[in-house]
């Protein structure tokens, strides 16, 4: 995909740069070559670029495009494939019901839904259909996102320990009757590849996607899938590899209380305290979910510059708990928002997800409120820090990629809002996908109000539906997991008493 070299001036009713404490009135922005060139009055910009096309709408709130800082490109959610929402540790055992959806189709469908609510970049935590085909799957995912107008951060997963059960796995296996013990134990394969083979995968994927990477549409990060699933030796090897190449590292961490218990049993301290001790913490690493952080953990995160990602809907649906938003805001932590392919309504609506983040704080009572502006910064300037190259920069400033969304505040305010209501606060309180009139990525229109955009999204949905029907004709996904699910549930429940 190439940048749009055509000059463009956008003149909204309000403009918010992703950083300031309020939205400005009377400002327009000039875009050329896929980048923001200048901010100023419409008259000033017209004088400096008389050839530029002018888009003007007094109803628009123009702001930076959003970064979905943790997702999976599922297309079809597990709840649509007989995997009901339940505690993560149980839910994971049920995922053998999922169909191997082609990644291009799934990511294209998700990209169009996200572009329709102003997302510019998505971090893609890759769930492979086949580990041996992961390079090709990652390339298909990146190209699916790009076809839908999104930049992507690709995260190929790595696991080398504790598959299926975090701690006490031998004890758990011994408790199972035959033939369940043999079938469950036989499904465990801790190490899919060596760390050297993983680095070879990273390099092969980078070579396959070198044009997309050079154009700023794709980035690759190292992805130890989760703290309990990746050894310290591999983590430190990844850090060394990343530091030499200017790469970032992303992992799931402290999503559930059982993961926090794993750290306590393993080191007698928290994951974050342990990672600080071994030198793994730094601005090069980001942690998805991060529900079970202590006050000391937050302090270490702040000191290190590491990035947190709140997956609020997913945390609710998988009974993981609630992110401590108030502490993150008080310490001004660098934090983003991720939909995790598990939004509250299965709709990948990033605008609504901001509201879930804002309202689902761990704190309650009279001191629990968090300024909605902090949530907007999580969606933009703070969340963009998850990328080593800040693909969608999360700010509107000269020289940066022209990734933006124009929200129609008449739609946001419908049927009524007082004219003095802060448009930024109202956006967090009420905006949803239908309120986005225009999304530009690299100065290129990826979503608009014309019927052609909805037709494109509908066609991607119909294609995905046809793919699913074909996959289910071969394998209907029915699995009798009831006994193992109940035994895993009982094991984790009882483990906290021991």
Image (tube, grey):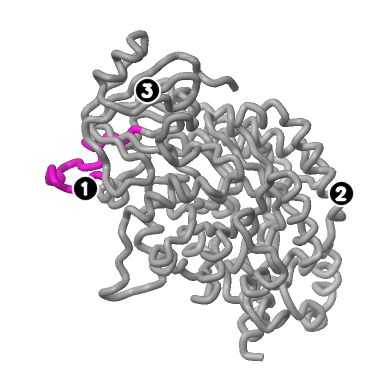
Asked if marks 1 and 3 touch (Cβ < 8 Å), the reply is no
Q: Nearer the viewer, residue 483 or 231?
A: 231
Q: Nearer the viewer, residue 303 or 495?
A: 303
Q: List the residue tagged with mark 2.
A: 197
Report the mark closest to the observer, 2 or 3.
3
Q: Nearer the viewer, residue 262 or 484?
A: 262
- Nearest to N terminus: mark 2 or mark 1: 2
Q: Secondary structure at mark 1?
A: loop
Distance of label 2 from label 3 (alpha carbons): 46 Å
Q: Residue at x 87, y 49 (%)?
A: 197
- Nearest to N terminus: mark 2 or mark 3: 3
Q: Residue at x 65, y 34 (%)?
A: 142
Q: Compared to 465, does 131 lie above or below? A: below
Magenta part of the protein: which range? Answer: 406-423
Asked if marks 2 and 3 touch (Cβ < 8 Å), the reply is no
Quarter that holds the C terminus:
bottom right
Q: Is residue 441 visible?
A: yes
Hey, which quadrant is residue 117 in on the image? Answer: top left
Q: Secondary structure at mark 3?
A: strand
Residue 255 placed where, x, y %? 57, 67
Q: 10 Å neighbourhood of mark 3: few (<14), some, or many (≥20)?
A: many
Q: List the residue tagged with mark 1.
A: 422
Q: Residue at x 59, y 53 (%)?
A: 78
Q: List the residue tagged with mark 3.
A: 30
Q: Nearer the viewer, residue 332 or 429?
A: 332
Q: 10 Å neighbourhood of mark 2: few (<14), some, or many (≥20)?
A: few
Q: Compared to 141, does 353 lie above or below? A: below
Q: Is residue 87 visible?
A: no
- Nearest to N terminus: mark 1 or mark 3: 3
Q: Residue at x 34, y 32 (%)?
A: 406
Residue 459 placed where, x, y %? 52, 27
């Amino acid at each position: 995909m190439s940048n749009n070299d055509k000059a463009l001036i956008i003149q909204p009713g309000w403009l918010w740069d992703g950083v300031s404490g309020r939205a400005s009135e009377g400002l327009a922005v000039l875009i050329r070559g896929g980048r923001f060139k200048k901010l100023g009055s419409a008259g000033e910009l017209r004088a400096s670029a008389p050839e530029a096309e002018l888009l003007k709408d007094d109803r628009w709130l123009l702001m930076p495009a959003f970064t979905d800082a943790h997702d999976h490109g599922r297309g079809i959610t597990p709840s649509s494939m007989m995997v009901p929402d339940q505690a993560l540790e149980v839910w994971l055992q049920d995922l053998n019901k999922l169909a191997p959806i082609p990644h291009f189709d799934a990511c294209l469908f998700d990209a169009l839904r996200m572009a329709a609510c102003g997302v510019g970049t998505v971090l893609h935590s890759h769930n492979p259909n086949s580990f041996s085909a992961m390079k090709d799957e990652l390339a298909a995912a990146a190209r699916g996102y790009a076809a839908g107008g999104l930049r992507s951060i690709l995260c190929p997963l790595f696991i080398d320990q504790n598959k299926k059960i975090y701690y006490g796995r031998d004890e758990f296996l011994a408790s199972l009757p035959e033939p369940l013990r043999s079938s469950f134990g036989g499904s465990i394969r801790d190490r899919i590849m060596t760390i050297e083979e993983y680095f070879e995968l990273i390099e092969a994927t980078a070579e396959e996607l070198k044009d997309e990477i050079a154009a700023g549409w794709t980035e690759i990060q190292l992805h130890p899938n989760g703290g309990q699933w990746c050894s310290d030796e591999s983590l430190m090897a990844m850090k060394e590899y990343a530091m030499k190449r200017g790469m970032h590292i992303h992992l799931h961490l402290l999503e559930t209380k059982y993961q926090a218990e794993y750290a306590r049993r393993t080191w007698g301290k928290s994951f974050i305290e342990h990672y600080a001790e071994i030198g793994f913490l730094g601005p090069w690493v980001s942690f998805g979910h991060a529900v079970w952080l202590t006050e000391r953990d937050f302090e270490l995160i702040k000191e290190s510059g590491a990035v947190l990602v709140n997956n609020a809907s997913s945390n609710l649906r998988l009974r993981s708990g609630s992110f401590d938003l108030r502490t993150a805001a008080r310490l001004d932590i660098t934090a983003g928002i991720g939909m995790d392919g598990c939004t509250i309504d299965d709709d990948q609506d990033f605008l609504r997800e901001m509201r879930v983040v804002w309202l689902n704080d761990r704190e309650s009572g009279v001191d629990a409120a968090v300024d909605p502006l902090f949530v907007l910064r999580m969606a933009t300037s703070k969340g963009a820090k998850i990328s080593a190259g800040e693909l969608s920069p999360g700010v509107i400033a000269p020289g940066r990629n022209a990734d933006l969304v124009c929200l129609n505040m008449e739609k946001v305010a419908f049927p009524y809002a007082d004219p003095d209501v802060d448009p930024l606060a109202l956006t967090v309180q009420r905006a949803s996908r239908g309120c986005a009139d225009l999304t530009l990525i690299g100065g290129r229109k990826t979503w608009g109000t014309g019927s052609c955009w909805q037709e494109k999204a509908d066609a991607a949905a119909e294609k995905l539906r046809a793919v699913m029907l074909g996959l289910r004709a071969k394998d209907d996904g029915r699995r009798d997991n009831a006994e193992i699910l109940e035994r895993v549930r009982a094991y984790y429940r009882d483990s906290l008493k021991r």
